Image (cartoon, grey):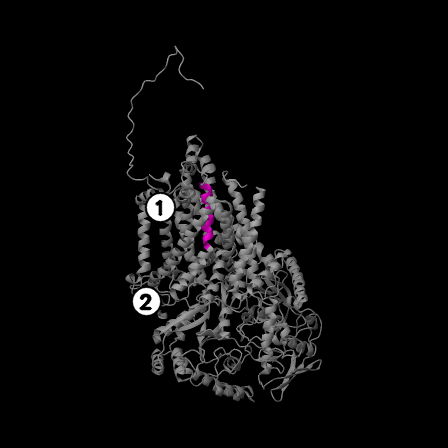
Amino acid sequence: MQTKRTFKYVAALSVGALALTACGGGGDNGGDTADGEMIINAHGIEPQNPLVPTNTNEVGGGHIVDAIFAGLVSYNTDGSTEMEVAESIESEDNVTWTVTLNDGWTFSDGSPVTANSFVDAWNYGSDPDNAQLSAYFFNAIEGANEEGNIEDGSDTLSGLEVIDDLTFEVTLKEPAADFPDRLGYSAYFPLPEVAFEDMEAFGEQPVSNGPYVLDEWNHDVDAKLSANPDYEGNRTPENDGLTFTFYTDPDAGYTDVQSGVLDVMDQVPPSAIETFQDDENLEAYTEDGSVNATITIPSSLEHFGEDEEGQLRRAAVSKAIDREAITSTIFDGTRTPSTDFSSPLMPDYSEDIPGAEVLEFDAEEAQDLWAQAEEMAPFEGSLQLSYNSDGAGNKEWVEAVTNQIRENLEIEVEPNPFATFAEFRELITNREIGTAFRTGWQPDYPSVYNYIAPVFGTGAGANDGDYSNADFDAALVSAASAEDEESRTEALTEAQAILMEDLPAIPLWNQDALAIAAQGVEGVQLNWQNQPEYHLITK
Amino acid sequence: MHNHTPRQGQERFVAPAVSSELPALHVDTSHPPESQWKQAWKALRRNWLFWFSASLLVIILFVVFFPNVLTSVDPRSADLSHSLGKPQAGHIFGFDRQGYDVFSRTIHGARASVIIGLLTTIIVTIIGLFTGALAGFFGGWLDTIVSRGADIFFAIPLLLAAIVGLSALNNVWPDRGYWGGVFAVVIALAVFGWPQITRIARGAVLEIKHLEFVDAARSLGASKWRNLFTHIIPNALPPVIVTATVSLGVYIVAEATLSFLGIGLPPSVVSWGNDIAAAQPQVRSGDNLHVLFFPAGALAITVLSFMLLGDAVRDALDPKARK
Amino acid sequence: MWRYIVRRLLQTIPVILGATLLIYALVFLQPGDPIVALFGEKPVSDAVRAELEAQYNLDQPFLIQWLLFLKGALVGDFGVSYSGQPVSELIGRTLPVTFQLAFMAMIIEAILGVIAGFYAGMRRGKIFDSTMLVVSLTVIAIPIFVLGFGLQLIFGVQLQWVPPTVGSDTSFTNLILPAVVLGLVSFAYVLRLTRTSVIENLTADHVRTARAHGVSDSLVNRRHVLRNSLIPVVTFLGADLGTLMAGAVVTEGIFNINGIGNLAYQAILRGENPTVVSVVTVMVLIYVVASLLVDLLYAALDPRIRYA
């Protein structure tokens, strides 16, 4: 432990020195076209963790890690998967997968990308001694526990085996037809040999194989990336580099886009939602988005159990919410009312899910449903809706939703704020919250399956409401092992139909993907993860 | 021993006695001499500023205690179809983004906001004045203990302290309802706010205790405690009053900032701070600024009335400024 | 004098101990599990949790955590943030910026506040006095997150007199608008305090005596009225430095300044106790030094006060 600390200190000191020299350069305004190079200045957030792919689970570090690494597969703008470092990923039974790599990929230090680059990185990420934040992503692999850590007594995942320099084999615990689609997520990126010599130093100044390389990371100020000349993958940069300038307040970033200091920003602060589309100082982009918002009512909440009374009350609450009115006034049309539990962007999205009309506003029917439930057992006290108020804009919609339920069902409904996400999540995780609460999901890979399996499967990691339905679980299994696209979509639709009946969570809306760019910036395209494709931006 | 009998032969000069009448002096000895406080009250009564600010305050307090007399609209009844509606008949202040009636919100918001501002100021002023006066007056080890004790609380900046203090309170005191929510904010602000007054009061006392009239009082045999309450504290009051009246507004706004950061009052409590925080997006668009104007204006009027009252009280306490 | 300074410096030890203990207790009472926050929505295995708790002393009772912190702080080691950076480095990077900002704000509020307060007091009840009353009411009644935001839009975006945000370039021109915004509320205090003091001193005996002696009006005003009026103002300003540094939480966010207020606020949101406590400790130190300087300034302003 002691040695580890010392390493950390030394590593960070040298970077501090680097940052100082960088500042000493003076007059540098954050990477503009000083010597004719086209550097795109993008809104960023200071990464909260070292830039190790398996230890990056938030958006600030994610931007940089995604830009500097290339995985086995990459995602196209529409969310479809394309082989990148992998030549092929094949399986006969959806359990044992053989991964063959393309020859010729190198890291920016010149070392080759081999089967070991992946297997060692995954073992590192899964090892509980390394306490990596994205270990969860390895939980499907044999030898890992539910949290994705290597099970006791071993140094490596038993499901990973290197065949030769360009081939390795992955054995899963259960069949998963969509396994290759998951592999573009940052937790599955490869690491060069040099990383394992000193991971602390690597996290400050990573050596990578992606479209860009990291030149400088000036903590709390910016990260400067330049195009990787050796990169020959699917995401060849159209520009010469990216500079992520860090902000803590999105309003400040918005102001900088207005004045042209910043070229592109991947979000719009709540204060500008009303005006950004008409703002003459900038270009606005809106697309359908993949992040959804839901209200989870835990099955342990009195009167909301998994029985007929609970179903009636959940349906009543859902029908008492006028999603259209909230999305158009509170969000000025930047959210789209939900029609299912996923997003229309998903390749396996289905338009007509039986029972989806429960998501449509109907105050009279809501009252009627509630009255039916009242005959079974009278509801007393108030219904509370908890949320974290450090997330921008939560308060506004929670207030509007509770106002509508209160007025349409004529019961006491109160917003219940928590100051921080940490506090809010702790109570949910410990099952101590005792109220309905806001939830949301951003998929890790593009599939309806990823919206429902980890969230509503019996005992699943993100099943915060402790929902359990054997029919639903069975539908998930048949979706995961489906042979073709059609039967898979069918199984997923069946699973969603069960959810519509039980409403373990009440879908509200999907957040549109929003971005803004300064005048003269071109090529801003929003991908399935609601992020601009930074490598396509030019100016 | 000298004898001052005049020498023989020396002519004595005797000034002719001019009989001049002494001016009539009416000393009412049937009552003890009026205290500083009594004199101040007499002066206060003659000041129109006092009556003006006091009537403003009476109106504000009336709104705080009887909001329903002025509006029958439920401040929590929202209709999104009225979102950001302009002022109109029946809804003279218009509607905010949630579709609440702004007039009703401004009236009902007075209770939480004024109570937070007033209660925090009163607590802080009493503690601060007392500790500051004792420390400045007696000096020595008492001064050291009070001053350094105040440092411990005041060294942690108020806003940060209120943020951690309130979240800690959340933990030990959840589900506190309307009054609990209001008092939690008062507690968080008061615990870290009193040393400001302590410092000001101590400084003023240090300045005053060397002045002539204090020495005079002491040489006339006034006891230390009597001296403190009749001479020192009244004369140390002006800077304390000024600081307290400004702080009153600052505390009300601190609630707004805390609510803006998401840890002040819950949305179920109607307050000017919550409404000002919710109005922030209108600053960017520049449209519909009425949702900001009315709660902020109400806050400004409240602060104004306390400031003017503070001015009047200060004048009354300054014997030289009395006419 | 020197004995007084030494004694005061010795007295800061219990102040720092008390303040850090207080903040440690408050932070310890914070709800929320920082490890859950760290992992976002994903589950954490017990082995990993134990590893992280040991690394940040989270498994210790709070008094032991506090003592371990003090032990480290004594040798300048404030621990490591959850992002793996030494907290001392985080502070070293952010403190100078905030200090520069707070200092500029203080100069602005002190100069403008004293001048405006002086004239308002000299011409009490006249138009200038009333105008200043309205100005101070406005800056008090509208919170920084609204007022600062509005001024940024007007001067930064529309008029383009100053850059709207600061970022990495912390030059004087970049910091001037944030400094004004930061100093506004304190400006109201200084203005009101000076005004009252001036009114008070105008009728004071020594001022009347000086006038009776034929000393010119401007000299009386400067030497007697103004100088004596500064005492409560100085008291206020000395205590205000700390407020300015924390008040910078909101201002630093609006203008994207990488200062210590923002660092503390982000750390609170993330439950990064080592960072929160270390930042507050540094603020305490600054406050203690500032208040010592103020007490010494008293002596300079008021010859009757002497420190033995």
**How far from the left and from the top, in percent, is residue A65?**
61, 70
Q: Is residue A467 visible?
A: yes
Q: Chain of mark 1?
A: B
Q: Quadrant of the C terminus of chain A?
A: bottom right
Q: Amino acid at mark 1?
A: Ala
Q: Residue furthest front?
A: B1
Query: Mark 1 highlights which residue?
Result: B312
The answer, for residue C190, to whether it is visible in the render is no
Distance of mark 1 from mark 2, alpha carbons?
Answer: 37 Å
Name the residue beneath numbered marker 2: B74
Task: Please state the horizontal and vertical placement of residue B143, each as a whole percent of the image.
Answer: 49, 47
Type of the residue with mark 2: Asp
Dominant secondary structure, magenta: helix
* Badge 1: residue crowd in 10 Å (few <14, some 14–19, many ≥20): many
Q: Residue B153: x and y, percent? A: 50, 55
Marks 1 and 2 share the same chain: yes
Direction from residue A361 to residue B167 in the image, left or right: right
- Look at the numbered disc 1 and give the secondary structure of its residue: helix
Foreground residue among A72 and C185: C185
* Residue located farthest toward the top when viewing the structure as drawn: B9
- Classify C24 as above or below A301: above
> Which residues are the magenta region?
B193-208
Res A90 → quadrant: bottom right
Quick one: SS at disc 2?
loop
Q: Quadrant of residue A139?
A: bottom right
Q: Residue at x 45, y 69 (%)?
A: A394
